[in-house]
Amino acid sequence: MNRIYHLSYDSNLTHLTPNIPCNRMEIELSRNRKIIEEEVTKRICFSNSISNCLTALAPIPITEWYVYTPDEEVDVYYPTPQQVPDCMMTNEVWVTKECKVKCIGKIKADISTEIEKRRNSEYGYRLIITTYDWEWIENYNNHNINNKKLGDYYR
């Protein structure tokens, strides 16, 4: 597994504990039909790029984020589109056990003008995905990670 990232507004994390995210995706298809991100599995959400983390969190009112990576070997689970409707676009992965993390820096994010639309014909809905530009405010240990757009890291 390549490096994975988790964003938080908290600067002092050393461990992350799985939970049910409070910002789960919800798509209203019609008055009587909704698609809701899976709400049973406790997990820690990561992605394979900082840009994809921001997109997975959208819409985001917070503009400054601390960037974390696991500080130990972790097992990852790849959710299905039934569990996370945008997982194929954000490359979201889950860690389902507590893990040690290290902060590698702090970023500032701004909404990009780019909106990507994709139709998920298998499940019959279209997602509008917001992408973000970001830059390092603090880059601990001088990590060489660039601001990549959504799609640069598709599985």
Image (spheres, rainbow, N blue to C red):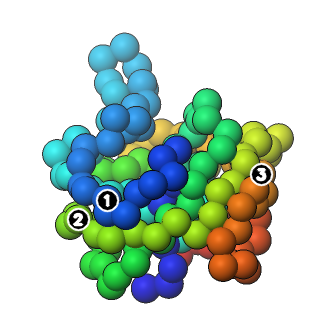
Q: Residue 72 location in percent, x, y?
A: 34, 82
Mark 3 lies on a secondary structure that is strand
Q: Which mark is residue 105?
A: none
Q: Residue 107 location in percent, x, y?
A: 69, 54
Q: Is residue 80 above or below residue 110?
A: below
The quadrant the N terminus occupies is bottom left
Q: Can residue 121 be seen in the rendering of this structure?
A: no
Disc 2 marks which amino acid? Glu
Q: Can residue 39 be seen in the rendering of this structure?
A: yes
The answer to whether 76 appears left or right of 42 in the picture is right
Q: Which mark is residue 16?
A: 1
Tell me how far mark 1 sits from mark 3, CA to CA: 26 Å
Residue labelled with disc 2: 98
* Cβ atoms under marks 2 and 1 closer than 8 Å: yes
Q: Residue at x 50, y 84 (%)?
A: 2
3 or 2: mark nearer the eye: 2
Q: Residues within 10 Å of mark 1 (few under 14, many from 20)?
A: some
Q: Residue at x 42, y 24 (%)?
A: 28
Q: Which mark is residue 133?
A: 3
The answer to whether 63 appears left or right of 7 in the picture is right
Which label's residue is closer to the chain start, 1 or 3?
1
Tell me how far mark 3 sits from mark 2, CA to CA: 30 Å
